[in-house]
Amino acid sequence: MSNYKNESTQDTLERLLAYSAAAGLGAFGAAQGAQASVIYGDINPDIIQAENDPEFLLDMNSDGIDDLRIVHVDNYAPAASSGWYQRFRCYPLGNTRVATNASKGNLYYVRSFGAGDDISNSNPDVQLCISPFSRVHVAYTNFRNLTDPQYAAIRLADSGGGLHWAWIRMKVTGTSSTNSLLTTYDYAYETDLYNVTGILAGDMGVTSIDGDLNGDGFVGLDDLDIVLTNWNQNVTPGEWSEGDPTGDGFVGLSDLDIVLNNWNNGTPPVAAVPEPATLGLLAVGLGAMACKRRRRM
């Protein structure tokens, strides 16, 4: 059964007009925020790989050097006892290494960590994979977990030779090698060296700011656009990038309120802070949409 709830355009119009007026009176505080040590990267759109799809390369720290090569290996005939999960590979490049969750099994496969798990030198379950192939394990307790997000641990190398703990979020769906998909969503890394500070699986650093749906460390027009783009739609519950910070699986007024109540919070990118008139223009646009809809009716 759908949980579709039709929030009216009029409700949205009134909400934006109110916030536009408040912005004109200076009701929103100045942008603020501290530099975080966790750097987050959203892969948008998500990378979805099926059999025979091309590999993709990922430069996690934007230093111009690729760190991972993620591929769905085709034309591979695994032994019957080992299963089809051997087709998915997360190859580390250069001095980067992939780690596994040793509490779930041997060190030959990339076994996942759950949200909030400690990825650091102090966690004995964090062990570097022995196999250079870094095969992604797709048991339901690993990357084929259909309900809870799962993360691979990465010991990321930078261009200066430093090493840092990082995570990358992936999921495998399907029941065999021929209908399986590997989706890669996002990643983050700790700027401190790996022997100083670890990272928690799923920690996105500055995206802990309420209303910062796109993870750029600032609540502004880009976040509002995510809400309006997905307005009145059922989306993945709790997926901020789809406009659902409330986690109810529906994009509506409660999600809009979270963005507007935190407007201008964080550290703005260049030209990210709109004039109060900008919100007013958005409201006018929604008003035009509402009038056009009424004429059609």
Image (cartoon, rainbow, N blue to C red):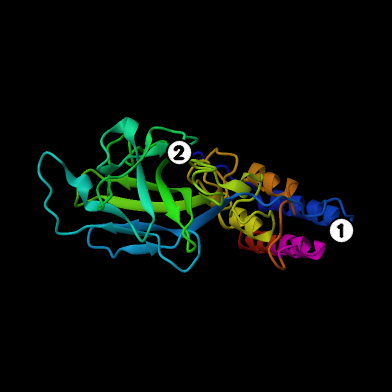
Residue 207 relative to residue 195: left or right = right
The numbered disc on residue 294 is none
Question: For the point 50% across and 64% down, which residue is it?
Answer: 62
Query: What residue do we see at 52% from left, 49% from top?
Result: 193
Quadrant for the C terminus, please. Answer: bottom right
Q: How would you rate the neighbour count of disc 1 (Cα within 10 Å): few for under 14, some for 14-19, many for 20 or more?
A: some
Residue at (46%, 59%) from the top-left corner? 161
Q: For this rendering, which residue is in front, 14 or 113?
A: 113
Chief SS of the magenta region: helix
> Picture coordinates of residue 91 (x, y %)?
31, 56
Residue 94 picture quarter: bottom left
In three-dimensional space, the C-alpha distance between marks 2 and 1, rounded to whole angstroms, equals 50 Å
Mark nearer the N terminus (2 vs 1): 1
For image coordinates 54% across by 52% down, the residue present is: 241
Q: How many marks?
A: 2
| Disc 2: which residue | 121
Q: Which residue is mark 1?
A: 24
Task: Reply above or below: 6 against 214.
Answer: above
As displayed, is residue 160 above or below residue 188? below
Q: Would you place residue 256 above or below residue 103 in this image?
A: below
- Disc nearest the viewer among 2 and 1: 2
For residue 171, side relative to residue 223 (left or right)? left
Measured as percent of width and height from the top left, residue 169 is found at: 42, 47
Question: Judging from the image, what secondary structure is the residue with disc 1 in?
Answer: helix
Three-letter amino acid code at the position of disc 2: Asn
The residue nearer to you, when weighing 22 against 206, is 206
Quarter of the N terminus within the rendering: top left
- The region drawn magenta spans 272-285
